[in-house]
Every structure is written in structure tokens, then in C-alpha cells.
Image: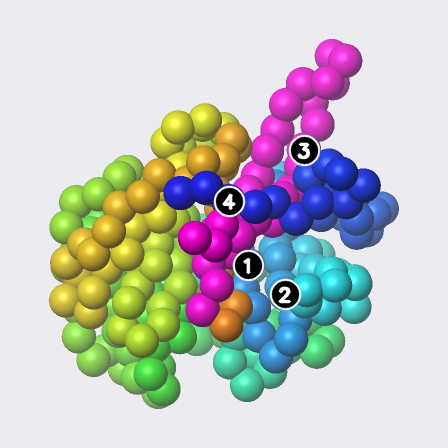
């Protein structure tokens, strides 16, 4: 799958540089989602561990807000619904965190069963969660009660973010800083693979999200420049046929 990167001045646009000093030390882009005309991207700081969420108008990418440091795990994935961001995973916890999409302040989280999750997307009036360390996905209703479990076919080892539309589940897979091991896999609602496609990017495919049916990706890229490690966050969309 070929992609078109968001560019600025003829070069790939680095979201970290675009946001500026508020993301100093927050080096790794993690989960992302779209909602109500805005793009939300999470960035991770390793030591001491925390997350910041950036809110941007879309597609202009004008920065609207940057959160204070939040203690919400790795924030591997996010989903938007009615003014709330639902964030996972939670560093060995079964809690799905809630963040106010306007203020980017943390609200009380929701404990969902006993599993750990690192992927989330809206599904009907509820959500679908990717269970860590296996091939299962969990569908919950709007009260976060289990509806059913989906067992997927084996695909690739490192599952990243996910999205869902019309019963088709989109999942990103990646191997860190790879040139040829980034994939988009589509599943049906039974967990059967509809398609497997390699995404032609270099770096780590961190998340997949949908905007009006268009498939978008976030990419984490690190490389050594003049002896110093540099960290980049890129946006790209599936190239139209």
C-alpha cells in the first residue's frame, strides 16, 4: 500500500516540531484518533513516565490544545465518542482511561474485566478492545459489559492501533523502525482476515484511524543525525487509486 505523507515546505511534516517546546522530552508518538473535526495524538515520555495528548484541527493541523502530563499508561490507542477520549493500554491494568476532549484533563477511568488492552475503537453503541498478548478482541456495550469475544486469524506479531467502520476492523501491525514490516490488516466481524497489505513506510506504524472513510496512519521514526538521536512523528494517508 502506497501512502501520501502530510508535508510542509516540500518535506514530511514532523508533528513534534510543529507543536514545539510543549513536546520536549515527549518523544514517541503513540495512539491517535479523529473526532468532531479534530485529530488527537498521544506522545510518550519515558522518564518519568507520562503522556501528553495534542489536539489539532483537521486537516489544517492547527494546534488547539496540549495536555499536561497524564498518567494513563502508554496510551497505545484512543477512540473518540461524544466529547470523551477513551485511552488504552494501561501498563498492566484493565482500566480504559477517559480524557475530556475539550480540556484534555483526565476523568475517572473504567475497569473492563480482568484482561489488559492495547487497542480500542467504537463499535455500534459500545466499543471493541484488542486483548494484549493473544488473538482475541472483546466487544462491549455502552455499559462496558461483554457482548462477545472475537478470535482472529494469526497475522503478525506486534499489533498497534485499531479502527472500525461498518463492521470492518482495521488493525495496524509493525516491527520497530522497519522498512518492510508495517502492515494494515482488515478483519470482518467474525475475526476472519479480509485483506493483508504492507504499508510502504519506514519507521514504526503506530496507529490507524479513519476520516470520512479515508485510511490514515501515524508513524514514529527515530534516526541518528550528526551523532544525536532524533525523534519524528509523521502523518500519512492511503494513496487514492
- Examine the rendered structure and indicate whether residue 73 appears above or below residue 8: below
Whole-percent x, y for residue 82 in the image = 55, 85
Residue for badge 2: 39
The answer to the question of whether label 3 and label 1 lie on touching residues, with beta carbons closer than 8 A, is no
How far is the residue under mark 2 from the one under mark 3? 20 Å
Q: Nearer the viewer, mark 2 or mark 4?
A: 4
x 45%, y 69%: residue: 213
Residue at numbered disc 1: 32
First in residue order: circle 2 vs circle 3: 2
Q: Is residue 211 magenta?
A: no
Which circle's residue, 3 or 1, is located before the other in the chain?
A: 1
The secondary element bearing badge 1 is classed as strand
Instruction: Give the mark nearer the N terminus: 3 vs 4.
Output: 4
Q: Residues within 10 Å of mark 4 (few under 14, many from 20)?
A: some
**Measured Cα–Cα span from mark 3 to mark 4:** 20 Å
Marks 2 and 4, how far apart at CA: 18 Å
Q: Earlier in the sequence, mark 1 or mark 4?
A: 4
Q: Which residues, given as a range, are shown in magenta?
A: 213-241
Residue highlighted by disc 3: 231
Location of residue 139 in the rendering, given as x and y in whole percent from the top left corner? 26, 73
Q: Are marks 1 and 2 in contact (CB under 8 Å)?
A: yes
For marks 1 and 4, give the one nearer the viewer: 4
Upstream in the sequence, badge 2 or badge 4?
Answer: 4
Q: Answer yes or no: is residue 144 visible.
A: no
> What residue is rendered at 31% in x and 76% in y?
166
Q: Earlier in the sequence, mark 1 or mark 2?
A: 1
In the displayed structure image, the side of residue 15 where residue 163 appears, left or right = left
Visual colour scheme: rainbow
Which secondary structure, mark 4?
Answer: strand
Residue 138 lies in what quarter of the image? bottom left
Q: Which mark is residue 3?
A: 4
Q: In percent of the image, x 65 and y 71: which residue is there?
A: 38
Amino acid at each position: 500500500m502506497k501512502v501520501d505523507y502530510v508535508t510542509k515546505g516540500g518535506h514530511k511534516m514532523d508533528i513534534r516540531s510543529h507543536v514545539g517546546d510543549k513536546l520536549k522530552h515527549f518523544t514517541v508518538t503513540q495512539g491517535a484518533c479523529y473526532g468532531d473535526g479534530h485529530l488527537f495524538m498521544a506522545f510518550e515520555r519515558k522518564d518519568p513516565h507520562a503522556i501528553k495528548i495534542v489536539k489539532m484541527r483537521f486537516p489544517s493541523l492547527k494546534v488547539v490544545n496540549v495536555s499536561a502530563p497524564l498518567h494513563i499508561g502508554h496510551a497505545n490507542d484512543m477512540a473518540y465518542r461524544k466529547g470523551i477520549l477513551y485511552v488504552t493500554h494501561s501498563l498492566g491494568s484493565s482500566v480504559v482511561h477517559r480524557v475530556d476532549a475539550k480540556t484534555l484533563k483526565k476523568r475517572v477511568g473504567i475497569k473492563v474485566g480482568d484482561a489488559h488492552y492495547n487497542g480500542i475503537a467504537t463499535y455500534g453503541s459500545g466499543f471493541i478492545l484488542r486483548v494484549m498478548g493473544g488473538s482475541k478482541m472483546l466487544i462491549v456495550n455502552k455499559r462496558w459489559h461483554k457482548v462477545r469475544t472475537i478470535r482472529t486469524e494469526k497475522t503478525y506479531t506486534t499489533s498497534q492501533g485499531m479502527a472500525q467502520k461498518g463492521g470492518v476492523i482495521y488493525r495496524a501491525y509493525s516491527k520497530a523502525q522497519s522498512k518492510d514490516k508495517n502492515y494494515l490488516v482488515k478483519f470482518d466481524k467474525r475475526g476472519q482476515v479480509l485483506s493483508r497489505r504492507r504499508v510502504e513506510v519506514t519507521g514504526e506504524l503506530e496507529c490507524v484511524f479513519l476520516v470520512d472513510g479515508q485510511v490514515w496512519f501515524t508513524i514514529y521514526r527515530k534516526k541518528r543525525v550528526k551523532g544525536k538521536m532524533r525523534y519524528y512523528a509523521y502523518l500519512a494517508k492511503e494513496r487514492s487509486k
